[in-house]
Image (spheres, helix red, strand yellow):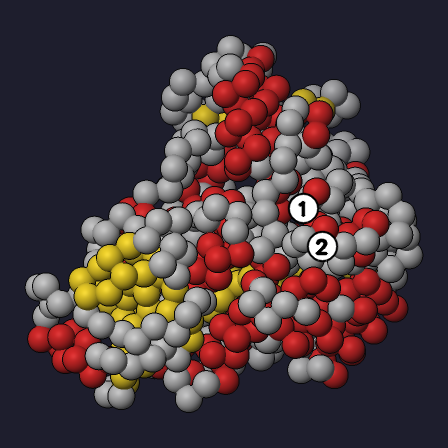
Amino acid sequence: MKKTWWKESIVYEIYPRSFNDSDGDGIGDLKGIIEKLDYLKELGVNVLWLAPVYASPNDDNGYDISDYRAIMPEFGTMADFDRLLEEAHGRSLKIMMDLVVNHTSDEHAWFQESRSSRESEKRDYYIWRDPVDGHAPTNWGSAFGGSAWEWDEKTGQYYLHCFSKKQPDLNWDNPEVRREVYDMMRFWLDKGIDGFRMDVINMISKPPVFADGPAGAGQYCDAGYMVTNGPRLHEYLQEMNREVLSRYDIMTVGECGGTDPAAARLIAGTDRGELNMIFQFEHVNLDGGIADKWAHKPMDLPLLKANLCKWQQELHGNAWNSIYFNNHDQPRAVSRLGDNSPESAKAIATVLYLMEGTPYLYQGEELGMTNYPFRGIEDYHDIESVGAFRQLTGSGSREPEELLDAIAYKSRDNARTPMQWNGGAGAGFTEGTPWMPVNPNYTSVNAAAEEADPDSVLQYYRKLLRFRTKSPEKDLLVYGDFQLLLADDPAVFAYLRTEGQKAALVVGNLTAEERTIGFSAGSAHGIQEILTKLAGKLPALSSGSKKAFASDMTLEPWEAAVWIAG
């Protein structure tokens, strides 16, 4: 397998609005990120993914961009960005930008010109359609509620917005749009950034004919379902790679919902000339669903293990995985898979970040930050959560109390509360009033307290990341084969990583109960040989006490460990 720096990297996503506020206005900023670069370097990450920092009216927290070549004033200036880039590179930290080019803000100059008249030279930059029988062209619904079509009174047509009505979709069939996007990408790459995370990138190719889709139990068909993995997607990605990406030594990851391993091998295949890797969502939909995000059910561990194993094995040697549970769109894994305890945070991290693929951490997970104790819908800032509540309770399809429980569990706002730096006022995030309330547990869950505690989640993350990137087992842990063990066990996540004569056994008890397990029964010869070599060995890494390996052993609640053979 070809070795590259981005396969061996560890990415840390920064949500700038909530990371660190340097000027006391309650909003995180670029200077605040600069202040914490040494902390990030010490953590052991080497790529910083910045959620959008471009100029934006913030209808969707920066994913509605009004100027791709300007910095949001709340975050600072272009000079601040240039300094951030310089300071990061001086610490051997790379910067990956968020590329949001399926849509723009309706306040972008392109859209303002496009909607000025049907004869505008930029009319075809966006997707405009005439009414059909006096109503919207199709029954497509926006991801944030309501129709995906917005009526424009002045020009007498509808425009498409798969997300907010303030996020009109770009028309990628127009070569001028693609040229504008590629020019903008070069602008940032020529500054020296190190890659792009590409927002909903597999939605850029729309179908040649717009038609109604299956509406299910609701009024609308999901627009995302209708435009995902469109007919010219690979043509556009290959053109982007040829014209821009291949000319720089960078990493790329595409956010690609509705994607299975076969589709991933096309988008991120080693010889396809498109992207390095994708984010897929199958595993994070297992406690809800693609059809209904707000269907709240417990995570089934055997189902989760089977899904992750499928991606590990079907992409091995053909494409590259991204490994994550946390990001700005997901609730906190320690509240989702764990029980909010430090022990569960450590166990989850151990079994997740020793699989094959590039790990993506999200700010605060290295502290064990948890979901926020939301009460009513008035507590939320997230446009998706508020829109879902209004639409589903308004239609009578969901009871408010039941839906609030599901939203509290799955809302994106869980990830967006301010970073908890210390136990002082504002959690050390700001000296002012934070734009979003700090989680009340900040007095105990914070970086300063965990710096002083050798058994903290922070200190364990540092050990884990060093183990993956700096230990003699680095190549094994990055490039080795993956084999799932104890597939049907409802409590234990165990697998082997093997490369040549070396093997790593990773085991985690993902419950709050003591668990007795046995590896010996039914083990294939190759596995049995590895288990024999491990007998009596102490773990190379452990989230609890250093327990010698035995084929039959008892794991403490939330105990995780790694043993090395060879």
In this view, the residue in front, 22 or 170, is 22
Measured as percent of width and height from the top left, residue 394 is found at 58, 13
Assign the N terminus to one quadrant of the image: bottom left
Point 45% across, 18% down: residue: 218
* 534 shown above or below 379: below
| Position of residue 505 in the picture relative to residue 334 (left or right) | left
Regarding mark 2 in the picture, which secondary structure is present there?
loop
According to the picture, the residue beneath numbered tag 2 turns out to be 420
Give me the disc on residue 497.
Answer: none
Point 13% across, 75% down: residue: 528
Give me the disc on residue 441.
Answer: 1
| Position of residue 346 in the picture relative to residue 110 (left or right) | left
* 174 shown above or below 319: above
- Report how many numbered discs are placed on residues in the image: 2
**Distance between mark 2 and mark 1 Cα atoms:** 9 Å
Can residue 160 be seen at all in this image of the molecule? no
Q: Are marks 2 and 1 in contact (CB under 8 Å)?
A: yes
How many C-alpha atoms fall within 10 Å of the one at disc 1: few (<14), some, or many (≥20)?
A: some
Point 56% across, 67% down: residue: 455
| Position of residue 189 in the picture relative to residue 346 (left or right) | right
Instruction: Give amino acid for label 1.
Output: Asn
